[in-house]
């Protein structure tokens, strides 16, 4: 049995961290659903930048939208929504069969809004309405300014994928914002069930300390942080606060592992996937990692609810001079900046493609 199926049977959802029009048009995404147990999908500005830049599949749609007077950000979101809606429809049977637990696709608000709460809320509402599909998550970064937007969006009934989380503290802050939104809905007599995942980035921890710690610690920091976060997740789900929300009809916000492609060429291509196997979680993985995983026939042990040896491993990093809390804050700030950089590059690609297509007309 393929390791992708083993993961699915164990209770972890595998989501593809990619979307392109070619994936949709070629039937590849449908094949991943049918053959590799893929049950959801995520997107971000970098993914769309590469998709549009490296393909002619969007050219006809861009020409059409240019003729309608669209340009820049408005043109991009029309392209993105077309892909997201098609993907959402492919995953809709999974969404229906799991009563909304699985089968989600994610679309991110403009990263330029990462530190603008009011504009983030407005953009989330608009994109959700335009998608008009029940299984579409809107991605909002779990920055300090993003947390109030997450709470307000959940209170408004908008399913949210909280992105750019790195540490246990980041996760707990995002989970608290989600729960506040749910508790406000309960107090207001509204339905308590609003979908959400909390996306914790893993591999970037190891990339950040590469060459700065003893070789024996290589590729261990991200997994240790994930194990520490997983313990907090399990404890929160069993807390009286969450049990009161369950009793009112709320659905848990699932923990999602992001950035799980191996960046160290000397390490296993499925390093993070095998280490982060746990029921009632999501792993969103790049296409190469998905295909590598499909070639494996075994997984190993599942994550320990008590965090395993994470604290001992993190203590070794502290001894090696790594300040975990400071590094986590730095990674989140750098992540927000990198998404802005990708967004600006995406807008430049849209502009250059638009100009080239207009000149060729």
Image (spheres, rainbow, N blue to C red):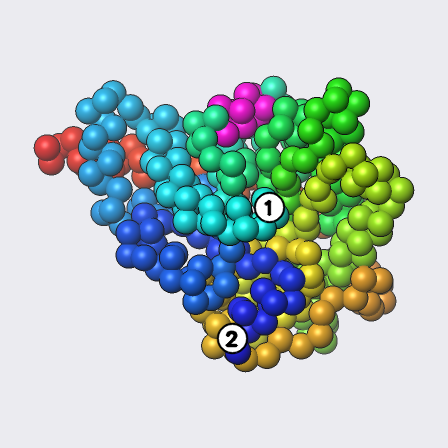
**Element at badge 2?**
loop
For residue 58, side relative to residue 80 (left or right):
left
Q: Position of residue 309 (x, y in %)?
A: 82, 68
Q: Residue furthest left?
A: 361
Q: Which mark is residue 99?
A: 1
**Element at badge 1?**
loop
Q: Position of residue 197 (x, y in %)?
A: 64, 44
Task: Identify the magenta region.
Answer: 119-128
| Residue in the image at 76% along x and 27% along y | 186
- Magenta-span inclusion, residue 121: yes
For residue 91, side relative to residue 186 (left or right):
left
- In the image shown, does 218 or 300 lie closer to the viewer? 300
Q: Alpha carbon of mark 1 to alpha carbon of mark 2: how far?
A: 26 Å
Considering the whole magenta stretch, tell me its main secondary structure: helix
Q: Quadrant of the C terminus?
A: top left
- In the image shown, does 226 or 150 lie closer to the viewer? 150
| Residue in the image at 54% along x and 62% along y | 261
Q: Which mark is residue 226?
A: none
Structural crowding at the residue carrying mark 2, measured as other residues with C-alpha within 10 Å and reported as few (<14), some (14–19) or many (≥20): some
Q: Nearer the viewer, mark 1 or mark 2?
A: 1
Q: Decide if residue 269 is in sight here.
A: no
State the residue position of label 2: 2
Reply above or below: 16 against 169.
below
């Amino acid at each position: 049995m393929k390791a992708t199926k083993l993961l699915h049977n164990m209770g972890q959802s595998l989501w593809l961290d990619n979307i392109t029009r070619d994936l949709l048009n070629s039937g590849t995404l449908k094949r991943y659903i049918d053959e590799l147990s893929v049950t959801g999908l995520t997107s971000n500005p970098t993914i769309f930048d590469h998709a549009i830049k490296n393909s002619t599949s969007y050219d006809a749609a861009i020409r059409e939208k240019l003729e309608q007077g669209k340009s820049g950000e408005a043109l991009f979101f029309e392209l993105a929504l077309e892909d997201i809606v098609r993907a959402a429809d492919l995953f809709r049977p999974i969404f229906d069969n799991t009563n909304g637990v699985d089968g989600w696709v994610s679309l991110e608000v403009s990263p330029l809004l990462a530190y603008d709460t009011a504009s983030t809320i407005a953009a989330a509402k608009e994109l959700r309405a335009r998608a008009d599909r029940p299984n579409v998550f809107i991605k909002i970064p779990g920055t300090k300014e993003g947390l109030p937007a997450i709470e307000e969006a959940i209170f408004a009934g908008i399913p949210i994928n909280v992105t750019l989380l790195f540490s246990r503290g980041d996760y707990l802050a995002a989970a608290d914002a989600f729960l506040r939104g749910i508790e406000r809905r309960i107090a207001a007599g509204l339905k308590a069930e609003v979908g959400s995942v909390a996306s914790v980035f893993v591999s970037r921890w190891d990339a950040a300390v590469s060459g700065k710690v003893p070789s024996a610690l290589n590729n261990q920091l991200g997994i240790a942080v994930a194990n520490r976060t997983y313990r907090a997740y399990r404890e929160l789900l069993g807390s009286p606060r969450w049990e009161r929300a369950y009793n009112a009809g709320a659905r848990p916000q699932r923990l999602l592992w992001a950035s799980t492609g191996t960046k160290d060429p000397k390490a296993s291509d499925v390093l993070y996937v095998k280490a982060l196997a746990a029921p009632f979680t999501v792993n969103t993985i790049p296409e190469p990692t998905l295909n590598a995983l499909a070639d494996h026939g075994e997984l190993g042990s599942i994550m320990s609810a008590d965090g395993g040896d994470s604290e001992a491993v993190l203590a070794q990093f502290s001894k090696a001079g790594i300040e975990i809390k400071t590094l986590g804050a730095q990674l989140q700030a750098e992540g927000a900046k990198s998404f802005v950089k990708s967004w600006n590059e995406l807008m430049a690609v849209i502009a250059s493609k638009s100009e080239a297509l207009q000149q060729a007309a």
